[in-house]
Image: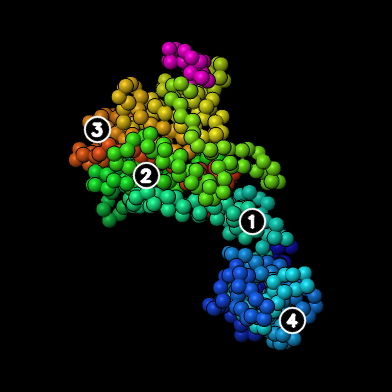
Amino acid sequence: MEDENELIALRRKKLEALRAKGIEPFGTAFDVSGSIAEVREHFKEGETFRVAGRITAHRDMGKSHFLDLRDATGRIQIYLHAKEVGSELFDLFRLLDIGDFIGVEGTCFVTKSGEPTVKVQTFQLLAKTLRPLPEKWHGLQDVEARYRQRYLDLLTNERSRAVFEKRIAIVRETRRFFEERGFVEVETPILQTTAGGAAAQPFKTHHNALGMDLYLRIALELYLKRLLVGGFNKVFEINRNFRNEGISRKHNPEFTMLEAYWAYADFEKMANLVEELICYLAEKICGSLTIEHRDTDGNITRTINLKRPWRRVRYRDLMREVAGKNWFELSAEQRRQRAMNEFELEILPQLTDFEVTQHVFEKLIEEKTIDPLFVTHCPKELVPLAKQNIGDSSLVDVFELVINGTEIAPGYSELNDPIVQRQRLLEQAGQEKQKIDEEFLLALEHGMPPAGGFGIGIDRVTMLLTGAESIRDVILFPLLRPKKL
């Protein structure tokens, strides 16, 4: 820390020296010939270019200096010699540091080693850096620092930067995928009077002017379905959800969701659509349907095969495979005891019977499933917004897509019966009518066509396609406790 403080003090002295020379250390706009990548693409010996970026390396050879200049698109070498720029600019150059932003104008040449280089004729300081970048440009070693100071992580960690470039591409290609299939992108309220669409704890706030409590939404679903009532046939939204719940490797209180609804479709068509979407993204982003996850040393730790068609199995059939053929013939207490004694799972006393089964499913099936699996026809208690199965009233027509031990996307044949929907929501809310979204039920009473829908976490898809181990690795600024200064 003492060495860092000394470096900061030295940079501040240089800052004052610049100002004493009448030079503004935090400069103005600088017209460039293009990005560094574009300059490299159009590079031609003898041509003059103007380029700007951050100094990331410096090789001092006395009166001549080689520097690396970087921007978001890449790196280019620049060469600076005292005779070329004159004594005044060369004196200014001595006040520069690694990390400073400069703009240069110069001619192109190729060094003996074949490196495209810009010979500087003049340069301009664009921004002085008052703190040194992480040592030796090797990146941040402290994991929390990577999340807290993401800007330094992006500067110094090529792997991290590549993850977020892929995330940006995933969102862009997802929009293209839906637009090419006739879906329209919409925006629905984030501030809501009733937090609905999922069983989750919301964040609560208060609107002073209206004197009313509001909630940050926990799901996109209920407003998108209102649009089906209003005559839209194919809608999707990519936006933020907020849940006031725990933080884990797979959960952040603020996360990005995609939800899509298709009038006159069902859960089978939505399963086909999400399968098509993820394969489309894999081929666009990764160039393959075989996804390899690697450790920091580049060793393959897991291989995921996305080749279609994906396996589809009913929920109860999967449970019988892992929990015993007689699982659903047992009493509720027998199921609870088997889960605790045979499967060694922690079953809390307050868990209901269907929650016990779901806990076994999550531990013995979901967490151990690597290649894509559609789990279909789940118990109706798990999914109160899905349409009841015609052949078995205890089930609903849904799928849950599991890949790499994680739920990636649930999808439904959407429940459009307002009477049944009211009863389901009351059961979910424990008969507390104030928790029911009456405006949504009113919309359903005006008629919603049969429809299919699904939701998919953009963060989890990014983890799947990049091999990131934690959701924090795919969110630019994950939630952290404030650091004590």
Circles 4 and 1 in contact, beta carbons < 8 Å = no
The residue tagged 4 is: 81
Q: Quadrant of the N terminus?
A: bottom right
User: Foreground mark, 2 or 4?
Assistant: 2
Residue 225 at x, y percent in the picture: 29, 43
The residue tagged 2 is: 260
315 vs 442: above or below: above
Residue 177 at x, y percent in the picture: 42, 50
Amino acid at dot 3: Asp
Residue sitting at x 42%, y 53%: 176
- Structural distance between the alpha carbons of marks 1 and 2: 33 Å
Q: Which stretch appears magenta?
A: 319-339
- Structural distance between the alpha carbons of marks 4 and 3: 78 Å
- Structural distance between the alpha carbons of marks 3 and 1: 51 Å
Residue sitting at x 52%, y 50%: 284
Which numbered disc, 3 or 1, marks the residue that appears first in the sequence?
1
Nearer the observer, 343 or 295: 295
In the image, which disc is placed on residue 407? Answer: none
Mark 1 nearby-residue class (10 Å; few <14, some 14–19, many ≥20): few
The residue tagged 1 is: 158
Specify whether 410 is left or right of 460: left
Circles 2 and 3 in contact, beta carbons < 8 Å = no
138 vs 451: above or below: below
Q: Say which element carries label 2.
A: strand
